[in-house]
Image (cartoon, rainbow, N blue to C red):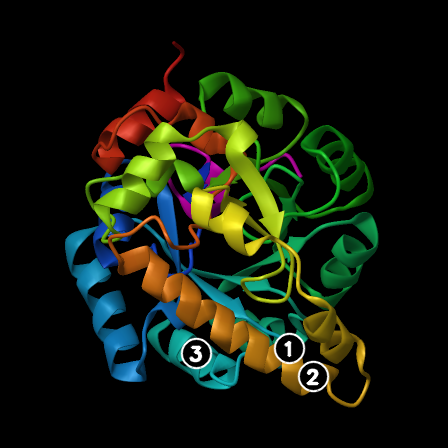
Amino acid sequence: MSKSLTEILGIKYPVIMAPMFLVSNAKMLIAAGNAGISGAVPALNYRTDEEFRAAIAEIRSKTTGPIGINIIVNKSNPKAAQHLKTCVELKVDYIITSLGSPETVIKACKPHGIKVFCDVVDLAYAKKVESLGADAVIAVNNRAGGHAGNLSPEELVPVLVKNCSIPVISAGGVGNYDELQKMLNMGACGVSVGSLFIASDESDVSKEYKQACVDYGAKDIVMSTKVSGTPCTVINTPYVQKIGTRQNRFERFLSKNKRLKKWVKMLTFVKGMKSLEKSAFGATYKTVWCAGPSIENVTAIRPIAAIVKDLVTPQ
């Protein structure tokens, strides 16, 4: 428990640039590694296994920083098995599991020395993944971007630190140096930060998406079930206000039907991800842009090196 994320991953600063669907890319991970932190990317950001392998090779050729891969491990991701196989074959440094049981991932990675960090939102699930052999838990709190938890960082981090024998990485609520130090003082070994890096030079999302992260703040982040069927934080643009943030009656009925739930969730997920993909690379405000409250600290579109420097330097 006394180990810092700097020791666990061999990095200069205890920060993971969080994996962001359709945002994270090879350029961002290279810049993160060269700035003294570690970057992670969702395997789903690559359409084919060939593209996925090429990205890992490119990152390795341009930085010595550890590479993290995020794998969605529930049944809505039919590519999970192939993603895991590729990660093990290429011996990535660590895997972050989300939205499901990490058991298969942990069993596959342990013999190869690949670390497994598991997203958790409460103590019960944290203890479960600890018993399965996870190397650390990522405490996803209610200030995280994307699929946020229900508990505040002040509630979640201390209870996990007190009751778990593996390191706790805090996700959510960090946008500046003081907030980083706050999480470390609560016992977290490090932090996972995503939204700060959307408005970076290395990000390939649209200028409009990046500028929205500059123009909007914490008060403009709302929770929506429209995107993937699971509550997700988005910027409350005029378009989001127009379409609403809750599933309609028919969508809710289908999601609750025991026989249809699995298939509807998968279809909703795919539909939502296509919507996010369109919005990430489109040039219109009639889109859905995922971000967390830490965009409050985004004041300009800048290089990742500059973002990291501000995050780890007392102001």
Residue named by callout 1:
265
Mark 2 is surrounded, within 10 Å at the Cα level, by few (under 14), some (14 to 19) or many (20 or more) other residues, namely some
Tell me which corner region of the image, top left, top right, bottom left or bottom right, holds residue 311: top left
Mark 1 is surrounded, within 10 Å at the Cα level, by few (under 14), some (14 to 19) or many (20 or more) other residues, namely many
**Which residue is at the far top?**
315
In this rendering, the label closer to the viewer, 2 or 3: 2
Q: Quadrant of the C terminus?
A: top left
Give residue 302's position: percent from left, percent from top.
Answer: 22, 32
| Highlighted magenta segment, given as a residue range | 1-14
User: What's the residue at 36%, 29% (across, down)?
Assistant: 215
Give residue 168's position: percent from left, percent from top.
Answer: 64, 42
Q: Main secondary structure of the magenta part?
A: loop
Give residue 144's position: percent from left, percent from top.
Answer: 57, 42
Residue named by callout 3:
83
Dot 1 amino acid type = Lys
Q: Secondary structure at mark 1?
A: helix
Residue named by callout 2:
262
Give whichever of discs 2 and 3 has the lower sequence position: 3
**Which residue is at the far front?**
242
Give whichever of discs 1 and 3 has the lower sequence position: 3
Question: Could you give the CA–CA distance between mark 1 and mark 2, rounded to whole angstroms?
Answer: 5 Å
Q: Is residue 270 above or below residue 208?
A: below
Dot 3 amino acid type = His
Q: Secondary structure at mark 3?
A: helix
Q: Are marks 1 and 2 in contact (CB under 8 Å)?
A: yes
Question: Could you give the CA–CA distance between mark 2 and mark 3, rounded to whole angstroms?
Answer: 21 Å
Question: Could you give the CA–CA distance between mark 1 and mark 3, rounded to whole angstroms?
Answer: 21 Å
Does residue 63 appear to the left or right of 295 in the view shown? left
Give residue 70's position: percent from left, percent from top.
Answer: 47, 63
User: What's the residue at 57%, 75% (across, down)?
Assistant: 268
Dot 2 amino acid type = Lys
**Which residue is at the far bottom?**
259
